[in-house]
Amino acid sequence: MDDETRLKETKLRLRNLRGGQSLFALSELKIVKNIGYFVDKKGNPLRKLCSLPCCLREQLLKHLTNIKCRKKDGDLVVLKRHIKALHLLLCPQTKTIELNGLMSFCPAQLKYCYYTKVLQMIATLAPNVQFLEITDGRCEERSCYITEEMLTPIKSLSKLKKLRVDSLCIEYNALKTLCREMPSLRYVDVIIDFYWNTDDLENDISDFESSFSHLTCFLFSGVILSMLRFEEWLKNLCIRHLPNLRVVHSLATCNITDIHIGIEEGELPLQPILPPLQESELRHLSVIVVPGLSELHQNLPKVTHLKVTPTVFWEQDDLQIDSLLEFPAIQSLCLQQVPPPQILDRFLDKYGRNLRALYFAAEYYENLDYDLQLDSVCKSCPNLEKLCLRHLRLLDDFSKNYYLPKLRELEWAPGRATRGACLSNILSAPNLEKISLLTQGDFDFDLSDLKKVSTLICQGKILRRLTNFKFQLLYCIPLKKTNVEYFKALSELLKNASAFLPNLLDLDGNFYFNTESRTPFDKSLTHGEMEAAFESLGGKNLIKFFYAYRKCTENLEDGILKIK
């Protein structure tokens, strides 16, 4: 089938799946797209925005504050317009505020001023807010700190239950004070500046308990990666002394885009995790295997998600894992690095039958291959609903048809050290709903198997329930050295998925090319450059399929395709 016909099939199928937009959704879209009309004019337009029902105002607020600036230095004009709209949309009935894009419009030198202004506005106009999130994605250097002027309005939100801030850092003592003075808080997710030493922390247990004992979820990271030692100390103290916590430090999972998962020798924690002093509510447990790890399962009967990271390689940790095989309720298992068969078998024999999620995340090494047998996973984990594989192959015996009958979600990044990964058998799982694939170069996935998957899709034999397909391609090599046949096979697979999968609602593509005309991963290519790059690699018209999936009510930016 030619591209034009497949594209028509895609648009027709999406139109039937999504149906007509409600009047409510259309109204939201029109107002947000024309927000300048309402805030820049006095009189009737202004009064109309203020008089909207609270349910519509909250939806408009969510859309407006999630729009992100595409300019590197921000856009002060747009920022002021959006803040004025924020002032009009906030009300005492507002329960959720997600500032995920608003502050991306703020120039760096004005950050402190406008963060303070926005937080004071929220405290005044929306005093009953229960969920506050500030994530503008502009704190890679993590040099911005929450000031006392910012903390004061946050503390006045007496009903706040959930606070998430990853665009500003907070000092540890300031965080303790904040949590102690806000007993309504249950969920905190922040970046902490650990400027104290571990002796200071251990000598202040009563103050520590009074500050954090009411939390059920306490997520945190250090300002810089070298603070891992302090992160581990704080995590261990939380497990030991805060029995109400269900999640501490981080979720016991991983994903295919994690950059660093190993533990350097100099990063080792000072001591192993000690079991809680009383029975704990903890559900997510992340463990670094170090000497002295024992009896960890005591007082942790409710752990459902377990993440295990070896210190160097698994062969040295065989004797340290006995206590990790004693948890009675594990449903999700994440193993950092791929353990040797004798250790992997112990984990799967113990937990495999009840696992709903399984994660394998290997660190990338140029000359080291990581392999996992598909049949072993299928036999050991018949109830698996999610499988995540990073930097390893899933070895496939093509003489047999193995699949996971309950699998709903697959994430897989084979990695440059492993070539020729095969998809056709694992994609035969009849209940797959979400797929995320990442390829970092030519032939991460087997070429002939990619063509086989494409044919199976056309024939209606696989992925009939798939709703979400995310594909990421990272090319560090120059564009002109890319293998055209491999990219064309990927392109055909994506086009066929778009046209023939009956329930596919989202096709999301992230492509990173080294064009040699600019620094890789630096500036976004123009639409014409995107199209030219695709066409030069045998992917003519591919960009049109991605644009067909733009969802106007949820994505107000210029497309969902990210190509750099």
Image (cartoon, grey):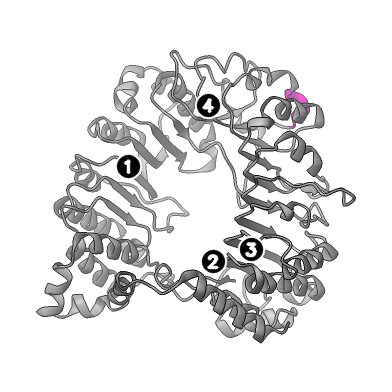
Q: Main secondary structure of the magenta part?
A: helix
Q: Nearer the viewer, residue 215 or 50?
A: 50
- Which of discs 1 and 2 lies nearer the camera? The answer is 2
Q: Which kind of residue does numbered mark 4 sit on?
A: Val
Residue that carries the numbered disc 3 in the rendered image: 471
* Rendered position, 11 above or below 520: below
Q: Which mark is residue 505?
A: 2
* Rendered position, 370 above or below 39: above
Residue that carries the numbered disc 4 in the rendered image: 303
Q: Which kind of residue does numbered mark 3 sit on?
A: Phe
From the top left corner, tell me how far across and down residue 336 is, in percent: 67, 37
Q: At x 69% / y 31%, what residue is drawn?
A: 352
From the top left corner, tell me how far across and down residue 186 is, in percent: 33, 35
Q: Mark 1 to mark 2: distance in Å?
A: 31 Å
The reply to whether discs 1 and 2 touch (Cβ–Cβ < 8 Å) is no
Q: Secondary structure at mark 4?
A: loop
Q: At x 55% / y 81%, what residue is drawn?
A: 526
Q: Mark 4 to mark 3: distance in Å?
A: 32 Å
Q: Which kind of residue does numbered mark 1 sit on?
A: Lys
**Which stretch appears magenta?**
313-317
Work out whether mark 1 precedes mark 4 in sequence or the reverse, and give the earlier one.
1
Q: At x 44% / y 38%, what residue is drawn?
A: 220
